[in-house]
């Protein structure tokens, strides 16, 4: 997917980028590749692949969820900024909070946010298990996103505590999404979530399968969750 194809496909989805946004994606790519030589941010480095497998894939969350009506978004384990930074570029009104456990990635994101001149973006170096217990963040976000972080049974314990009542947990998954959901739906229920939509599609050119899960927060997360760092992964709620 070259840059022109990227723009045209977004237009088909109702997203028309300004020249400023087009330039932001170009600079995003350049910074990603530059920093990737110093720290491991991504195995995908070819421009066309980055535009499809990272940028377009991240923005796809907006095709199936009401991003335009969401004000506050928290991205758990964002890594190199996916999906939150592409979403922020396309939807500048978003107030974005990113939490990641690796300080080197936060350093990259600090420069990225500065160079792209993005406003209302907060970055936190923290474990999601600890972050979700902090009163200033717990159940404070309209939407929480996560992409390629952990399997659903683990991911829901990291994300749902941050979602406000009636808010959305948006999980971006690959080809194993259905298997993950089968194993993780009990955890989602325990943590206060309810599946309201599940959409599967293929990326336009690579045709890799993607599944997006929209999970509504229908009741408060019990106070004992999330558990201590490492526990969700060691003993998932399955």
Image (cartoon, rainbow, N blue to C red):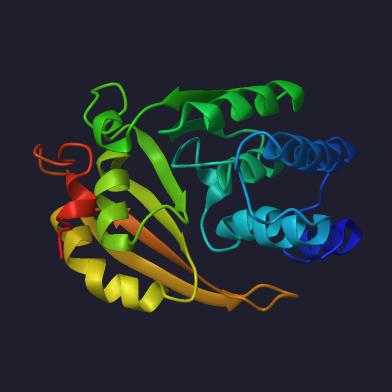
Query: Which one is in front, 192 or 146?
Result: 146
Residue 4, compared with residue 143, is above or below; it is below
Q: Residue 81 lies in what quarter of the image?
A: top right
Q: In this view, does 193 lie to the left or right of 209?
A: left
Residue 64: percent from left, percent from top: 54, 63
Query: Which one is in front, 213 or 153?
Result: 153
Q: Which residue is drawn at 15% across and 40% down?
A: 227
Q: Which residue is drawn at 60% across and 43% down?
A: 41
Q: In this view, does 83 lie to the left or right of 170?
A: right
Residue 217: percent from left, percent from top: 27, 51
Q: Which residue is drawn at 63% across and 38% down?
A: 88
Query: Which one is in front, 114 or 138?
Result: 114
Residue 200, compared with residue 167, is above or below; it is below
Q: Which residue is drawn at 50% across and 35% down?
A: 71
How many marks the image carries: the answer is 0
Residue 2: percent from left, percent from top: 87, 61
Residue 123: percent from left, percent from top: 50, 25
Please identify the quadrant where the C terminus is shown: bottom left
**From this viewpoint, is residue 14 visible?**
no
**From this viewpoint, is residue 29 visible?**
yes
Q: Is residue 225 left or right of residue 130?
A: left
Please identify the quadrant where the N terminus is shown: bottom right
Residue 95, compared with residue 206, is above or below; it is above
Q: Is residue 8 left or right of residue 114?
A: right
């Amino acid at each position: 997917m070259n840059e022109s194809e990227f723009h045209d496909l977004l237009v088909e989805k109702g997203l028309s980028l300004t020249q400023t946004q087009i330039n932001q994606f170009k600079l995003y790519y350049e910074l990603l590749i530059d920093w990737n030589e110093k720290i491991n941010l991504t195995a995908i480095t070819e421009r066309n692949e980055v535009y499809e497998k990272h940028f377009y894939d991240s923005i796809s969350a907006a095709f199936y969820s009401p991003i335009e009506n969401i004000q506050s978004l928290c991205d758990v384990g964002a890594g190199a900024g996916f999906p939150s930074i592409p979403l922020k570029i396309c939807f500048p009104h978003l107030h974005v909070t990113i939490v990641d456990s690796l300080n080197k990635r936060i350093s990259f994101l600090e420069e990225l946010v500065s160079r792209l001149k993005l406003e209302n973006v907060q970055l936190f170096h923290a474990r999601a298990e600890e972050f979700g217990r902090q009163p200033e963040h717990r159940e404070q976000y309209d939407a929480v996103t996560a992409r390629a972080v952990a399997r659903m049974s683990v991911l829901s314990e990291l994300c749902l505590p941050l979602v406000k009542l009636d808010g959305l947990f948006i999980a971006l998954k690959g080809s194993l999404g259905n298997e993950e959901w089968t194993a993780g739906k009990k955890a989602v229920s325990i943590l206060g979530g309810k599946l309201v939509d599940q959409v599967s599609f293929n990326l336009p050119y690579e045709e890799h399968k993607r599944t997006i899960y929209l999970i509504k927060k229908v009741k408060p997360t019990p106070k004992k969750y999330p558990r201590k760092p490492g526990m969700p992964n060691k003993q998932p709620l399955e």
